[in-house]
Amino acid sequence: MSATFIGNGSDFKLLPLAGLNPDLLPPVNLHLPAEKTSRVRLYRSADIPIKASDIDALRAHGITELLVASSDYEKIQPLLAANLGTLLSDESHPQRERLGLLNRVVTDTLREAFSSNNMADIVATTRELATHVVDIGIRSKNAIRDVAMIANHDFCTFTHSANVASYGTLLAHAMGIRDTDELREIAAGGMLHDVGKLEIPNRILSKAGRLTKEEMTVTRLHPARGFQLLRREQEVSRGQLMMAYQHHEWMNGDGYPVGCVGQELHLWARICAVVDVFEALTGKRPYRRPNSISESLTIMERESGTHFDEEILRCWKSNFLEGSRA
Amino acid sequence: MLEKQFSGRFQGMNTFTQRVVVPDYVKHKVPDGTVLPATMKDSRRFARRSCDLTAHLEILTGWMLDDESERLFEVPVTNISRSGACFFHHVQLFPDDQLILNFGKLDRKFQVARCRRVADKCFEIGVHVMASDTSVDRTP
Ligand SMILES: [Fe+2]
């Protein structure tokens, strides 16, 4: 979660309004963040069902998420995942909020799946989630900008992977890839691209300062470790493997682990490289503030053709220009 | 002829092709034959010795290979230790690809630990010895 809220001795989690479907979810207490503090106040107790008019009123006040106790969220989370298709196709909710809900569910589900350490389960989960990423992605206008606005930007692999999956799918679509199966593979590949980090010690991944040379060396093993973990899985395609193995390669050969150049790099890996760096730049890090979208694009432009595939980066940037349509 | 020095499974085979061309600047850059430092997990447990050998390579399981792919090559080996070796090859190999290197009297099964592109169609492959009782998996 991007923020921790406390109150009544409980931790709270944010629930997007687009996920508040009383027909699908059990009744729970709903809370609002108290202004200017990290405490919460009760908005609606579980015995009073929330109505569509309440949701409209919240939106009119600029509120797009409510808080639920973590213990309640644990009950809701599997139902959100199980009913994701229904929730995402409910057009009474704004597209941006539905994309936010998707982002939240993908992050939570990946966190759970990755904690199992069972690679077959992880792969199956990403395939399932990928169908939703593609379904909403290809029918949404300006989705890349919306995702960039709503994406969680905390410093965690699951959030990063969820964002990379959405960005990668939308970029592939913007580049003209229309085959739904291919887009789903790219979406799932985005969720799996950093799976090798499962084997990097947490003290390095979550280190609040810059990494030492030795820690950097260990971190740089993750593409090869990801490849080793995924190559054993029948369901993982060649392109997905290359997303995991080649997403830190540069077009000019300065990347790792192999130092391949240009067309030696799989198209999906080149897509992944662009959205991976964009997500990292716009995300929070313990040692710097997040870059704005335009700052991130400016930084990336300096490495067009050397680090990034020029055409892919141009396509990515065009989605943020005024009046463009993803 | 080179093949005559080789024993066992390689003896009499005349299908080896040495495709890799190692440019001089690569040799200059890496006088001891090593481009990459060994990584933590893959580091050799014993001191490496640079060498100028040619070995016969048979790729057993190659991620990029199919049934039609060539699997027998001659490769220049640049360093060797009791637990691993390093050689140049004209295509990349992938982590956990399995192979046999035959040095004449010595015939060992290895697994790819790392691969680094050092020039066009020239990859430095670091491999570590597999346990001798590991069965040979020939599926691509
Ligand atoms: Fe990565």
Image: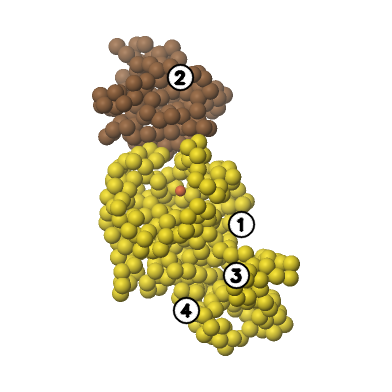
Chain colours: A yellow, B brown
Report x, y in % for residue B91: 33, 34
Q: Residue furthest front?
A: A36
Residue B53, image quadrant: top left
Residue A112's disc number: 1
Q: Are marks 1 and 2 in contact (CB under 8 Å)?
A: no
For this view, does B104 lie left or right of residue B136? left
Q: Secondary structure at mark 2?
A: loop
Residue, x 58% and y 52% (percent of image)?
A114
Residue indicated by mark 4: A94
Q: Amino acid at mark 4?
A: Pro
- Residue A185, compared with residue A88, is above or below; it is above
Q: Amino acid at mark 3?
A: Leu
Q: Chain of mark 2?
A: B
Q: Amino acid at mark 2?
A: Arg
Residue, x 43% and y 29% (percent of image)?
B37
Q: Secondary structure at mark 1?
A: helix
Observer-side mark, 2 or 3, equals 3
Residue B68, image quadrant: top left
Residue A278's disc number: none
Are the residues under badges 1 and 3 in a single subunit? yes
Observer-side mark, 1 or 2, equals 2
Are the residues under badges 1 and 2 in a single subunit? no
Residue indicated by mark 3: A14
Q: Chain of mark 1?
A: A
Q: Secondary structure at mark 3?
A: strand
Residue indicated by mark 2: B48
- Report crowding for label 4: few under 14, some 14 to 19, many 20 or more residues within 10 A (C-alpha): some
Spatial distance from mark 1 to mark 2, Cα to Cα?
A: 43 Å
Q: Residue furthest bottom?
A: A53
Are the residues under badges 2 and 3 in a single subunit? no
Residue, x 54% and y 28% (percent of image)?
B135
Spatial distance from mark 4 to mark 1, Cα to Cα?
A: 27 Å
